[in-house]
Amino acid sequence: MYCSKCGKEVASEERFCLRCGSHEKQQTPLKNKNDKTQDTPLILIDGNGWYYLVENRLRGPFSERSMRKKFIDGFLNEKVFVRFGTEGEWFLATDVPEFKSLVKFPNALKRSSLRQFGEYLLIIVAVCLCLYLVIATIHKKQTITITNNNEVASSPPLQWGLTKNGIIAQTNKARQENGALPSLSENFLLNAIAEERLKDMFKNQYFSHYPPSGENFMELAIRFGYKYNRLAENIISGEYRNDEKVVDGWMQSPGHRANILSSEVNEMGVAVGKGYLKGNETWIGVQIFGHPPDHH
């Protein structure tokens, strides 16, 4: 098979051309003899064109050699999304022939037994510490109430803190209770866009749909490669007891409510975090709603 755009020979299992990113293939080589790209050897190892998405952060461009080294060294694994070119589609590393063999055989990514033991030990210590902090926090927040019969009773503490999964669940609950609208699915690219907006607001000390840098959520969607027919954003800041209170706050605002109950979106991404904004400790939450183009 050959690329219909640049003429490079493409393996049947490859979904796109590694030279130009085109998805169009043909059985025979290009017949245009003046097209010198057919005679130019492909040296992707020394060319930058690969990107990957890890922890909601876009990284790249990298050469194929650099990408392969990251897989071999264990910095990237089979759960990483990769793409070639700034407008290429995202694929799991296991679906890309260039990296499939590196993530398929775990021996290629093995670390030393001592390092693995140290990592497991750190994980166990971290889990124990978290459990201790949770128990201590719950105990601290418990309140003592006195009933009318002068009996002392312990009341359970209120749930505090915001979570991404909780806000997604509360959003879909609001859609179900207001017209039985379909639930929105979580999208990893929309999560990454929301995370980028959250970090930018804390970093540059502002709270607005319009960043000082000028790169709003729609421009971030272009940079992260999210194609859409519809895109919307909700943001909120303040001290909130839990995820339900955040979604309730949005539902009291006509504009935010319209985004949550929109029938023109079918997926969403969320990021929440606590930090200091202009000297005050506060929560910031970001929702990004989207609807990708329909494929016919």
Image (cartoon, rainbow, N blue to C red):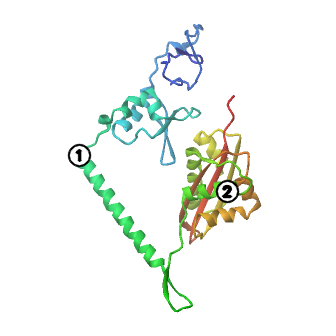
Q: Amino acid at mark 1?
A: Ser
| Left or right, 207 with reference to 122 | right
Residue at horizontal 64%, vertical 51%?
288
Can residue 209 be seen? Answer: no
Question: Which quadrant is home to the C terminus?
Answer: top right
The residue positioned farthest toward the right in the image shown:
254
Task: Residue 93 in the image: state x and y as whole percent.
Answer: 45, 34
Q: Quadrant of residue 112?
A: top left
Task: Residue 209 in the image: state x and y as whole percent.
Answer: 68, 56
Q: Is residue 130 above or below residue 295?
A: below
Q: CA distance from mark 2 to mark 1?
A: 46 Å
| Left or right, 27 with reference to 43 | right
Q: Is residue 227 above or below residue 254?
A: above
Q: Is residue 240 above or below residue 195?
A: below
The residue positioned farthest toward the bottom in the image shown:
150
Residue at horizontal 46%, vertical 40%?
80
Q: Are circles 2 and 1 on residues that touch, CB within 8 Å?
A: no
Q: Amino acid at mark 2?
A: Asn
- Dot 2 alpha-carbon crowd within 10 angstroms: few under 14, some 14 to 19, many 20 or more: some
Task: Residue 79 in the image: state x and y as whole percent.
Answer: 44, 40
The disc placed on residue 113 is 1
Disc 2, SS = strand
Q: How many marks?
A: 2
**What residue did someone put label 2 on?**
234
Residue at horizontal 29%, vertical 35%?
107
Disc 1, SS = helix
